Image (tube, helix red, strand yellow):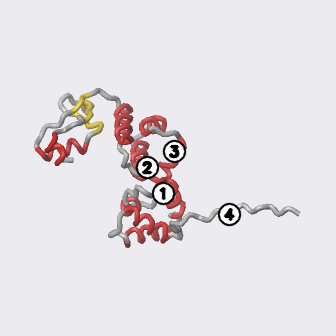
């Protein structure tokens, strides 16, 4: 990003709001990476300044994150969990993420249901998808939590999707889809 800004300038401004309680500082709503890149280059950052209430700030952040096409299910789950932990209502979180209540429940079950540290050990695993993350949560109960963490630690040299698969495999899941029972033909007399 810094190389891109160095070559062509900052194409998209960041969004900031006046920092509550001070007149000379600003809080970034979105554009943290652009701000860091400009800072490293010693350039001023272009920004749109907008007075935003806390809920408006979260909605703006959520919409910006949703526009990034490369967010994995896990990253969305952690973002949703952080918003809920900050005390925002589930309705606001749903609006910020552009999802319904049931999808929010699935995101939170993954963010809050994995053993501590496992998500960081696995990584974003963009190919895993919602059903497999939910499956992993259900398989990590009880003694399997430590087994999952050990499997993730043992495969740190693999890419994040391969680590995810190895953890599932260690818990007894294979990557093959379960066979569906075939509908038999009824034999007529």
Q: Which residue is mark 2?
A: 77
x then y, percent, for residue 176? 53, 66
- The answer to whether the residue labelled 4 contacts the one labelled 3, judged by CB atoms less than 8 Å apart, is no
Q: Residue 95: image x %, image y %?
A: 45, 35
Farthest residue to the right: give it: 189
Q: Residue furthest front?
A: 189
Where disc 2 sits, the SS reads helix
Q: Nearer the viewer, residue 71 or 139?
A: 71
Which element is circle 3 on?
helix
Q: Is residue 85 above or below residue 147?
A: above
Circle 2 crowding by C-alpha within 10 Å: few under 14, some 14–19, many from 20: many
Q: Earlier in the sequence, mark 3 or mark 2?
A: 2
CA gap between label 4 and label 3 equals 29 Å
Q: At x 38% / y 49%, what residue is drawn?
A: 71
Q: Quadrant of the C terminus?
A: bottom right
Residue wearing tag 1:
133
**Which is more N-terminal, label 3 or label 4?**
3
Q: Are marks 2 and 4 in contact (CB under 8 Å)?
A: no
The secondary element bearing badge 1 is classed as helix
User: What whole-number distance in Å separates the C-alpha atoms at marks 2 and 4?
Assistant: 33 Å
Tags 3 and 2 touching, CB below 8 Å: no
Q: CA distance from mark 3 to mark 2?
A: 10 Å
Q: Are marks 1 and 2 in contact (CB under 8 Å)?
A: yes
């Amino acid at each position: 990003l810094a190389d891109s800004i160095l070559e062509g300038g900052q194409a998209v401004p960041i969004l900031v709001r006046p920092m509550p309680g001070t007149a000379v500082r600003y809080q970034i709503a979105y554009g943290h990476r652009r701000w860091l890149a400009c800072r490293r280059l010693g350039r001023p950052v272009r920004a749109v300044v907008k007075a935003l209430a806390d809920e408006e700030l979260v909605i703006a952040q959520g919409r910006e994150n949703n526009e990034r096409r490369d967010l994995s299910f896990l990253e969305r789950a952690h973002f949703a969990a952080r918003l809920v932990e900050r005390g925002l209502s589930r309705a606001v979180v749903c609006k910020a993420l552009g999802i319904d209540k049931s999808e929010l429940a699935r995101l939170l079950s993954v963010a809050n249901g994995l053993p501590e540290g496992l998500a960081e050990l696995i990584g974003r695993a963009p190919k895993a998808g919602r059903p497999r993350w939910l499956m992993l949560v259900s398989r990590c109960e009880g003694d399997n939590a430590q087994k999952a963490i050990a499997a993730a630690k043992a495969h740190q040299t693999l890419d994040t999707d391969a680590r995810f698969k190895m953890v599932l495999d260690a818990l007894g899941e294979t990557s093959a889809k379960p066979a569906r029972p075939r509908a038999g033909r009824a034999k007529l007399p």
